[in-house]
Image (tube, rainbow, N blue to C red):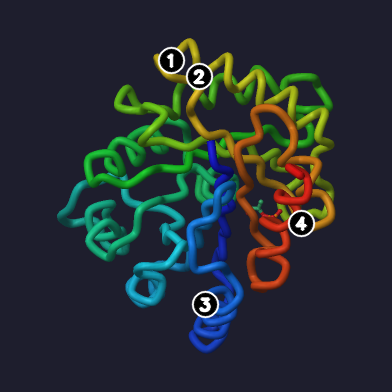
Amino acid sequence: MKKLIAGNWKMNLSREEVNQLAYDLMTNISPEPGPRVEWLVCPPFLYLDRMTKFFADSPVAVGAQDCSAHDNGAHTGDISARMIAEMGARYVILGHSERRHGHGEVDETVNRKARRAHEAGLIPIICVGETESERAQGREKEIVGRQIMDSLPSSANSANTVIAYEPVWAIGTGKNATPEDAGAMHAFIREALAARIKDAAHMRILYGGSMNADNAGALLATAHVDGGLIGGASLKAESFLAIGRSLKEADG
Ligand code: PEP
């Protein structure tokens, strides 16, 4: 399976900076779909329309960073999965730790949003991961196992859903999980998925948490690590594309 290298731009970048980043990506990326890598960028909602048009017919897919748990109607401030799909986006990040911890999202909310994403034909990237204190207590598998069980809707399969393992203590901290720790968690997630869905072996499981060009080669070469969800290093074309290049080197 090709590795998915996904950039989460979060609430960063001005309009000019978004244009520049998109231009830099487009001019430095190979125009042909690569044999090993698929690229994805997830800009803030306001730039979605422009970015899907800009990257149309390119090897870069576009996704959103969240969607509403509702289909449509009186939900001030919400953006529905259908609206996102209508903009030409293909993916939506759901249950990111900044939504779970900063906006009180629970597994049930993530599950409802993922169902909306499926109904709209979007691929949700469902994020799971333990906090530092949960890991210190040896509870990382219990926490992540529960998130997998409760956040995945029954409509999930390996073609329409991606999982991102993002230990909370690694996000934006410069402290990435070691390939051994990430590998152990990804193998565990694969097993937990097998209890929920038939074709778990083919579901992509991304690693996220301070991934950069220096650590990506080893992380992406680890069994069950099917790509990366990248925050900080996705804000510059050079550092984002270097992650894809490190994969080629790791693969030989
Ligand atoms: C993220 O926000 O999903 C993330 C992994 O961020 P960073 O790469 O900056 O740790």
How far separated are the C-alphas under marks 3 and 1?
Answer: 37 Å
Question: Please, is residue 106 above or below residue 238 in the view?
Answer: above
Label 3 sits on what residue type? Ala
Is label 4 within 8 A of ligand 1 (CB to nearest ligand atom)?
A: yes
Determine the secondary structure under disc 2.
helix
Q: Which residue is mark 4?
A: 212
| Front one among 244 and 95 | 244
Q: Which residue is mark 3?
A: 22
Q: Is residue 41 left or right of residue 244?
A: left
Where is residue 236 drawn, in percent x and y?
67, 73
Label 4 sits on what residue type? Asn
Q: Are marks 1 and 2 in contact (CB under 8 Å)?
A: yes
Q: Are marks 3 and 4 in contact (CB under 8 Å)?
A: no
How far separated are the C-alphas under marks 1 and 4?
Answer: 32 Å
**Label placed on residue 173:** none
**Label placed on residue 196:** 1
How far separated are the C-alphas under marks 1 and 2?
Answer: 5 Å
* Mark with earlier residue (4, 2): 2
* Mark with earlier residue (3, 4): 3
Q: Which residue is mark 2?
A: 193
How far separated are the C-alphas under marks 4 and 2?
Answer: 27 Å
| Quadrant showing the C terminus | top right
Where is residue 104 drawn, in percent x and y?
51, 44
